[in-house]
Image (cartoon, helix red, strand yellow):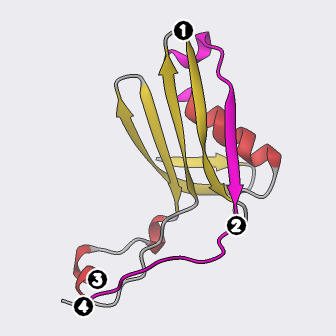
Amino acid sequence: MRFEYKNFECDVDIFYRDNDIVVRFYDSSKEQNEEEICNFVIVNPGYGYLIFKAKGESGLLSGFLDESVFSSDDLVEASIDFIESLSPIAKEMYIPHHIDRVKLTSFVEYNGEC
């Protein structure tokens, strides 16, 4: 599945658990295949995650998105609309949200070889 907004698009993985939904935004061309995992691997975390949690008759939406990719409020709002559109119950709910736009400053990595 793909997320599209104006001239931006990316791949998404969608995970469901009961009425809760997690969406991972990423570029599938940067994903490794199984054969590449045995050698030097740079694991790409993608562009971020959003989670919708149903809480009775309301819901909560939170997550983080890469600021260099989700650079405008309109793009973040479009990602919120996208995850809400995946839920058949979200249309009926009050859903406050808090989405962090994050900037990569450093990382911890292990790259072992087989």
Q: In the image, is residue 101 part of the stretch drawn in magenta? A: yes
Judging from the image, what secondary structure is the residue with disc 2 in? loop
Q: Is residue 87 visible?
A: no
Separation (CA) of disc 1 from disc 3: 45 Å
Separation (CA) of disc 4 from disc 3: 10 Å
64 shown above or below 61: below
Separation (CA) of disc 2 from disc 1: 34 Å
The residue singled out by tag 4 in the image is 113
Q: Earlier in the sequence, mark 2 or mark 4?
A: 2
Task: Check disc 1 and give the amino acid type.
Answer: Glu
Q: Earlier in the sequence, mark 4 or mark 1?
A: 1
Question: Depth-wise, is mark 3 or mark 2 nearer the camera?
Answer: 2
The circle on residue 114 is none
Q: Quadrant of residue 103?
A: bottom right
Question: Depth-wise, is mark 1 or mark 3 nearer the camera?
Answer: 1
The residue singled out by tag 3 in the image is 36
Q: Earlier in the sequence, mark 1 or mark 3?
A: 3
Judging from the image, what secondary structure is the residue with disc 4 in? loop
Judging from the image, what secondary structure is the residue with disc 1 in? loop
Task: Check disc 2 and give the amino acid type.
Answer: Lys
58 shown above or below 25: above
Residue 85 at what x, y percent from top left? 57, 27
Few, some or many C-alpha atoms within 10 Å of disc 3 (few <14, some 14-19, many ≥20)?
Answer: few
The magenta stretch is 85-113
Residue 22 at what x, y percent from top left? 46, 40
Q: Quadrant of the C terminus?
A: bottom left
Q: Earlier in the sequence, mark 3 or mark 2?
A: 3
Q: Are marks 1 and 3 in contact (CB under 8 Å)?
A: no
Separation (CA) of disc 2 from disc 4: 29 Å
The residue singled out by tag 1 in the image is 57
